[in-house]
Amino acid sequence: MKKLNWLGIITGLILLAVNLPFVIIIPSSLTAAGYLSFPPQGFSWQWYEKILDRPEFIDSLWFSLQLAFVTAILATLIGTLAAFALSKYQFRGSRVVNALLLSPLTVPTLIIGIAVLMFFTRIGLAGTFTGLLLAHILISIPYVVRLVLTGLSMFDYTLEKAGYMLGARPFRVFWDVTLPLIRPAIVSGMIFSFLTSFDNVTVSLFLISPGTTTLPLAIFNYMQETLDPLVASISTVVILLSLVFIVLLEKVYGLERLFGLTSQSH
């Protein structure tokens, strides 16, 4: 009789626990019943069709995509420059600057939301797109800094020196030598910034207005009024959209490298 593979059993149970929300939400969105239930009663696409009859979901989806796209661009630009400065130049207080850049990862998002609400109310940015954008950039920059620093930790700076010795200008060296080698880390930081902005609820909750409601908060507001399979269908759309970007992240950078499981590049 073969011994039980306890490690495999434990791993399987952990995977089941992590993916249990997907196992419940996705089938529940395909029910033919008029109420939220699992297992689903019958099969129907009607709840996906009804998403189109809810303009608040469509409008908030487009708004979330636009907000996440702009957040990803600006957070990637700022975070990449900061990572370069921290990695390439040794200056007094660099560790403090690094800690401050990564601090949004350690501070509860509820506290960040309250802090930015108080500050933006004082300067007149509360309830505006600019205020919401700045808050999302704040919570997205740490991911970019961390990923780009990881990419730069494996970068051979002698390649840059060789470019300078051959007479290339600094911008040319950066564009032709440095950027191609760390591009996967930068793109991964951009994808992570997009997901962080698109999925955020806590910080956005303090800064939205009727014209700046994100999709997660539109779902949250709808659930306070009623709980039907429409919630499961729109949640499935969010899950699938996020899954697309996770797959892109795996293709571009590799999840093993992202979580420090391997030092080999893909």
Image: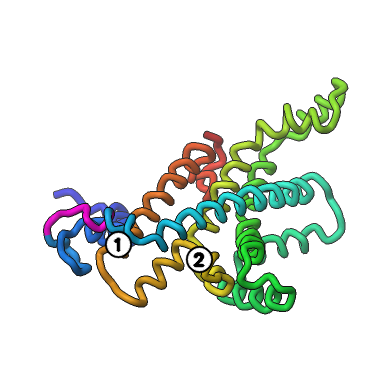
Q: Nearer the viewer, residue 251 or 155?
A: 251
The answer to whether residue 68 is magenta is no
Residue 108 visible at all: no
What residue occupies the far top of the structure in this picture? 166
> From the viewer's perspective, is residue 132 above or below residue 123?
above
Residue 265 picture location, percent across and down: 55, 35
Q: Taking 188 as reference, is 87 left or right?
A: right
Q: Quadrant of residue 135?
A: bottom right
Instruction: Determine whether the residue tagged by mark 2 lies in a helix, strand or loop.
Output: loop
Q: Would you call the spot at circle 1 few (<14 residues within 10 Å), some (14-19), or many (20 or more)?
A: many
SS of the residue under disc 1? helix
Q: Residue at x 61, y 71 (%)?
A: 127
Residue topped by disc 1: 232
In this figure, which residue is indicated by the disc labeled 2?
A: 213
Q: Residue at x 84, y 32 (%)?
A: 170
How many marks can you see? 2
Residue 59: x and y in percent read 45, 58
Q: CA distance from mark 1 to mark 2?
A: 19 Å
Which of 249/66 is in front? 66
Which of 118/123 is in front? 123
| Rendered view: 197 above or below 218 | above
Whole-percent x, y for residue 54 in the image? 35, 61
Which class describes the residues within 10 Å of circle 2: few (<14), some (14-19), or many (20+)? many
Any magenta on residue 44?
A: yes
Check whether the beta carbons of the residues at disc 1 and disc 2 lie within 8 A of each other.
no
Task: Give the residue drawn at x 26%, y 68%.
Answer: 228
Give, as a single range, the part of the protein colored magenta. 42-48
